[in-house]
Amino acid sequence: EAGVTQFPSHSVIEKGQTVTLRCDPISGHDNLYWYRRVMGKEIKFLLHFVKESKQDESGMPNNRFLAERTGGTYSTLKVQPAELEDSGVYFCASSLGTRETQYFGPGTRLLVL
Amino acid sequence: AQKITQTQPGMFVQEKEAVTLDCTYDTSDPSYGLFWYKQPSSGEMIFLIYQGSYDQQNATEGRYSLNFQKARKSANLVISASQLGDSAMYFCAMREGWNDMRFGAGTRLTVKP
């Protein structure tokens, strides 16, 4: 069974540009989560989808971040416009049930110059 | 307030020996789950072990065991018979009730040959 996949694995962009990260959860997992780890800091929760609905987006840092999960399958996280402080590793995770173990993808390393 | 505390930024262990990675947590919710994840140098987050707050016995998964001391609010990870491939960052995480996961700062484990 395929695990959580994320694309791209790395992205280097300039400040002010737009980047879109993609996450494909484990098949059948209704719950999808986005996290990020900014350099030297802790892994922070961004938001949680249950199917196509945003269950909790309290961790989204500001309105430059937009997450979608149309159709309840894969999800995208768009950063527009990107700022220097957005650099870090963005992880996606999925779980079968809301209270069940979350399985993480390999992460997308974003560098904003 | 810090919910998850990992006091050891770095740990060294000799190959084939056991090592304990510390994790303490803070919650007033009677229902919570505790998780350990491993992050090797390749960057992915690998789920290792889970302990529920109502579980009577300590969780074990192969060479991994979780020393759950509820009264002390600690959930230390014990790795027995360390292998070189165990060298990685280890994150302790907690999920309270229906809320989202919070992560500790991580402990970097280095296994010496």
Image: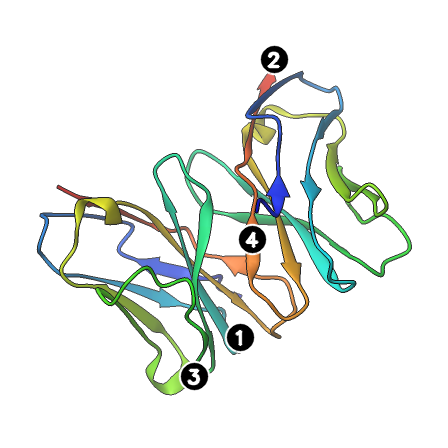
Calculate the distance from the C-alpha at mark 3 to the C-alpha at mark 4.
21 Å
* Mark seen at residue B113: 2
> Label 4 marks which chain's residue?
B
> Label 3 marks which chain's residue?
A
Q: Amino acid at mark 1?
A: His
Which residue is depicted at the point 54% across and 36% down? Answer: B106
B56 sits left or right of A8 in the view: right
> Label 1 marks which chain's residue?
A
The residue tagged 4 is B102
Say whether marks 2 and 1 touch (CB < 8 Å): no
> Label 2 marks which chain's residue?
B
The residue tagged 1 is A29
Calculate the distance from the C-alpha at mark 2 to the C-alpha at mark 4.
33 Å
Q: Residue B47 location in percent, x, y?
A: 60, 50
Calculate the distance from the C-alpha at mark 3 to the C-alpha at mark 2.
49 Å
Q: Which of labels 1 and 4 is toward the front?
A: 4
Task: Name the quarter where the C terminus of chain A is drawn.
Answer: top left
* First of labels 3, 1 by sequence position: 1
Q: Secondary structure at mark 1?
A: loop
* First of labels 2, 4 by sequence position: 4
* Mark seen at residue A53: 3
